[in-house]
Image (cartoon, rainbow, N blue to C red):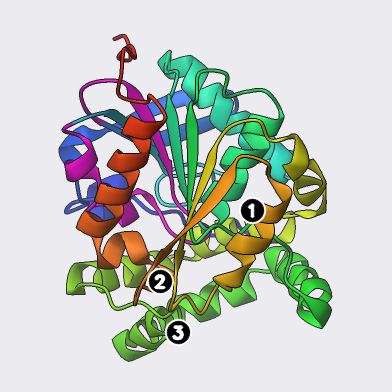
Amino acid sequence: MSPARQLDWQRDGRDWPLRESSRFVDAGLVRWHVQILGRGPVALLVHGAGAASFSWRGLAPLLARHFTLVIPDLPGHGFTASLPPAQQSLAGMAAALLGLLRELDAEPVIGVGHSAGAALLVRAALDRGLGAVHLLVGINAALLPFAGVAGLVLPLMARLFAHSSLLPRFFAWRAADRRAVERLIASTGSIIDALGVELYARLVANPGHVAGALAMMANWDLQALVRGLPELDIPLLLLAGSRDRTVDPNAAHEVARSAPKARVSVLPDLGHLAHEEAPRIVAAQLLCAARAYGCLAGSQSMSG
């Protein structure tokens, strides 16, 4: 069975947000698409499953006044190549992300992750790979397994579909109906701009991207992450949208009971894509926390 077609930078990236900040970097076994912009201490921004670097399009210019931002497309997402199957686990993807940082000679002082991106950052921190980080921020962080039967069935379904080309091609067919994409986004509890809807439609219409997202979900085991939360010694700020329909906002409080340095801040009337809905509100929270935890005081910029 032939591999699913990947996104093409010249065609699909022609109007990609912050395109002028994009570069392609070989690190480990992966050719990464990564955006680097701003000045100051390094901040790493990690998108969630099924998204790509464009999801930071509103927040990045606000943070770039204070930080040098490193914004990758995760393996198998957007314009970044996939990892080998054996490395598509949470630990494997976190290790690949740390490899990219080493290649860039970047030492973040703050890591910001949305949804599953927050799980990657916590995994990397537990594996002692983020030694310079003063603060982790999870925006609607997906750190806990789904409860009940869903926790058993959904990963199994993802594994089945990850080895088939049928579901990625079905999604690509459905993405031709813009209303279907709008309904998918609305189901997260968020309302985003027209550009965001168009870019998500572009991703969902690409079988390669969908296959990458499914492969990530198929190998996502959060049980070990949960067991490690009491050992997380980096402060963790959990921003929880009160209208999030993808990750239960109450999950943030459950995580905070396990992670000794975690605290929760609720984002009223915002959904799962809170950073796309209200980038100024999220930026204000991030910058306030960054100052409180010393991320902006006396830190070094990324070299090169």
Whole-angstrom CA distance, mark 2 to mark 1, is 37 Å
> What residue is pinned by disc 2?
205
Residue 233 figure quarter = top right
Labelled disc at residue 256: 1
For the residues carrying marks 1 and 3, which lies nearer the camera in this image? 1
Residue 272 figure quarter = bottom left
Is residue 215 among the parts visible in the rendering? no
Q: Residues within 10 Å of mark 1 (few under 14, many from 20)?
A: some
The amino acid pointed to by label 2 is Ala
Is residue 195 among the parts visible in the rendering? yes
Point out the image quarter for the N terminus. bottom right
Whether 172 is drawn above or below 301: the answer is: below
First in sequence, mark 2 or 3: give its number.
Answer: 3
> What residue is pinned by disc 3?
187
Q: Residues within 10 Å of mark 2 (few under 14, many from 20)?
A: many
Dot 1 lies on which element? helix
Residue segment shown in magenta:
37-65
Dot 2 lies on which element? loop
Whether 248 is drawn above or below 96: the answer is: below
Whether 248 is drawn above or below 45: the answer is: below
For the residues carrying marks 2 and 1, which lies nearer the camera in this image? 1
